[in-house]
Structure formats: structure tokens, C-alpha cells
């Protein structure tokens, strides 16, 4: 169990990135949803001991993460949103080097570990290829391999599927699901589908605050009977936004399809539709944006 209590962080430029963030994150896949700038990466870096919060605490089981960072780092695997590799070094050689840095000094043990990790992420057949020749998805899977060195109890992945093609994205998500059967895995993303497919528990963060947490199915159930759909001309969108809580818009055959949140039918022409996690997500963002407006 990872327990976050009242984490706050304000940068020197005045941006309040985290505001009293408290979460209980159990073993398994946990989705952290939020738009760019919501505070997700700040929270991930703080949990990973790469920066200190202004206030708050982080406990991983009985370990005080902020008080004993070296011990926390030994239990942590981290795949940041952007990470560099040496393009002229092979996957096998780079992973061997990283294993040595993480304390696996026995050559035979390290060789077996590297081989096992490369097989787990389906890169063993290209282990001799230079990292500069890897596709985006292969790089992400290599990133997971390095994050798994040392059998971590907590794995953090920050926006891991951004930019991946559908096949690579699905392969990567399957790998995360397999890892999540054994340890705490935090999946930080703005892609709703990733959380829908993978995570039995989740939280939505916006404006540096936790807006909602729980099981995706329960959060979806809370919107039953309150999501309405209508096809409109795109020129009328501004009018609807002014009068209604528009959750989302998408183009379809030259027209605009809108989802609106309302306790009853908002207008003629609307039909009730079953909610999904995207409706929950955009609903929370709508509330967060409204709360952030000056009175």
C-alpha cells in the first residue's frame, strides 16, 4: 500500500502544482488521470523522490519515503515521460550497465537477470540491436525493463503510451497489466482508454487537486441517467457551451456530436446515453475549471 497524505507543492514561479493531495494506492494497477498541467508529473516525481514537497507525507507500507529516500529508491521502478538512452549502445549492454549501477555486481547473476528482463518485455530477439534503432514502443518496453531491475515494490510510469501506434500501445498495456499482478503500478496518463482497460482503481487530478478517486465502474455508475447526446451544427457549439455543461465534443460526418451533463433532458433533440469513463473525466475537469474561476 502506498499512502499519500496532504502533499503540497508550489514552484518558485508561483504555480501551485499540488494542493493537499491524499490517496491510498493498493497493490495492482492504479490509474492517475488528468490533463497536461494538472500536477500528475509533479506528483510522480515527488513519489519517486526526485523532488521534495512543501508539505505532506508518503508511506510505502512501513517505509517513510521522504525520510529514507535511498531505501525508497531501492524499492522503486520509474519510467518517466521522457528518458534518454545511448543510441549507439545495445539494449543488452545498456541493461547490463544499469543492473550493475543498481547493485547487481555478480556477472552471472546480472547476465541471467538481463536475459530474463529482455524476454519479459519481448526484446530478447533484438538484444544486440543499438537503442538508437528502436521504435517508440520498443524504447518504452526497454524503459520498463530497466524499471524492473531489483524487483521493485512500486512501479511508476508517466504518460507511457503517448505517441505509440495502436499495436505498440496494446502490447505495452498488456505488459503493464502483467506487472500489476504483483506490485503497485501507478499509470499516470491523460488517455482515458488506458485507465478504462487496465485499472481497477483510479483517481482524477486537476488544478493540482484530487477531484475523484475510486473504482472506474462505480464512478461511471454515478452518472447514469445524467449524460445526454445530440448532433448539432458546429456553428452552434458556442451557444450550447454557454447554456449547458458540455462534457465533450467530436466531429461526425461534418456535424458535431456533444455530450451534456444534466439531471434531466436539457432540450428537445437530446437523447440519454450510457455514460463512460470519458464522461466522468470531462465532468470532473468541467467542475475543476468552474471552481478555478475567480468569483
Image (cartoon, rainbow, N blue to C red):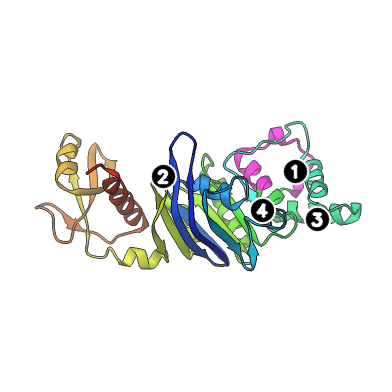
Locate the N terminus by quadrant.
bottom right
In the rendered image, residue 137 lying in the magenta stretch gets the answer yes
Label number found at residue 77: 4
Where disc 4 sits, the SS reads strand
For discs 3 and 1, the disc positioned in front in the rendered view: 3
The secondary structure that dominates the magenta segment is: helix
From what the image shows, is residue 89 above or below residue 116? Answer: above
Query: What's the distance in space between the residues labelled 3 and 1, CA to CA?
Result: 16 Å
Tags 4 and 1 touching, CB below 8 Å: no
Viewer-side label of 1, 2: 2
For residue 35, the mark is 2
- The residue tagged 1 is 126
Nearer to the camera, 67 or 128: 67
Q: Which mark is residue 113?
A: 3
Q: Is residue 244 magenta?
A: no
**Are the residues tagged 3 and 4 within 8 Å (C-beta)?**
no
Residue beneath the point at 21% across and 49% down: 245
Label 3 and label 4: CA atoms lie apart by: 15 Å
User: Label 4 vs label 2: CA separation?
Assistant: 23 Å
SS of the residue at dot 3?
helix
For the residues labelled 4 and 2, say whether their Cβ atoms are less than 8 Å apart: no
On the image, the x and y values in percent for residue 177 come to: 58, 60
Tell me the crowding category of disc 4: few under 14, some 14 to 19, or many 20 or more residues within 10 angstroms, Cα based.
many
From this viewpoint, is residue 146 visible? yes
Q: Position of residue 281 (x, y in %)?
A: 35, 53
Mark 3 or mark 1: which comes first in sequence?
3
Amino acid at each position: 500500500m502506498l499512502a499519500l497524505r496532504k502533499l503540497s507543492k508550489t514552484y518558485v514561479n508561483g504555480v501551485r502544482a499540488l494542493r493537499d493531495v491524499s490517496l491510498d494506492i493498493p497493490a495492482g494497477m492504479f490509474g492517475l488521470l488528468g490533463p497536461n498541467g494538472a500536477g500528475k508529473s509533479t506528483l510522480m516525481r515527488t513519489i519517486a523522490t526526485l523532488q521534495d514537497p512543501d508539505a505532506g507525507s508518503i508511506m510505502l507500507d512501513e517505509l517513510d519515503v521522504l525520510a529514507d529516500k535511498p531505501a525508497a529508491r531501492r524499492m522503486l521502478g520509474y519510467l518517466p515521460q521522457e528518458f534518454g538512452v545511448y543510441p549507439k549502445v545495445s539494449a543488452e549492454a545498456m541493461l547490463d550497465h544499469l543492473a550493475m549501477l543498481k547493485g547487481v555486481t555478480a556477472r552471472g547473476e546480472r547476465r541471467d537477470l538481463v536475459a530474463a528482463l529482455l524476454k519479459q518485455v519481448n526484446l530478447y530477439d533484438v538484444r544486440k540491436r543499438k537503442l538508437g534503432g528502436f521504435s517508440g514502443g520498443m524504447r518504452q518496453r526497454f524503459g520498463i525493463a530497466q524499471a524492473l531491475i531489483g524487483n521493485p515494490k512500486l512501479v511508476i510510469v508517466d504518460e507511457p503510451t503517448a505517441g505509440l501506434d495502436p499495436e505498440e500501445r496494446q502490447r505495452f498495456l498488456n505488459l503493464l497489466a502483467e506487472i500489476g499482478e504483483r506490485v503497485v503500478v501507478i499509470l499516470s496518463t491523460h488517455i482515458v482508454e488506458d485507465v478504462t482497460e487496465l485499472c481497477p482503481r483510479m483517481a482524477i487530478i486537476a488544478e493540482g487537486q484530487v477531484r475523484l478517486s475510486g473504482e472506474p465502474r462505480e464512478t461511471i455508475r454515478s452518472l447514469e441517467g445524467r449524460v445526454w447526446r445530440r448532433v448539432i451544427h458546429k456553428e452552434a457549439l458556442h451557444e450550447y457551451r454557454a447554456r449547458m455543461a458540455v462534457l465533450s465534443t467530436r466531429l461526425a460526418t461534418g456535424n458535431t456530436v456533444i455530450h451534456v451533463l444534466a439531471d434531466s433532458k436539457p432540450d428537445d433533440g437530446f437523447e440519454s446515453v450510457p455514460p463512460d469513463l470519458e464522461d466522468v473525466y470531462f465532468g470532473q475537469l468541467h467542475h475543476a475549471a468552474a471552481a478555478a474561476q475567480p468569483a
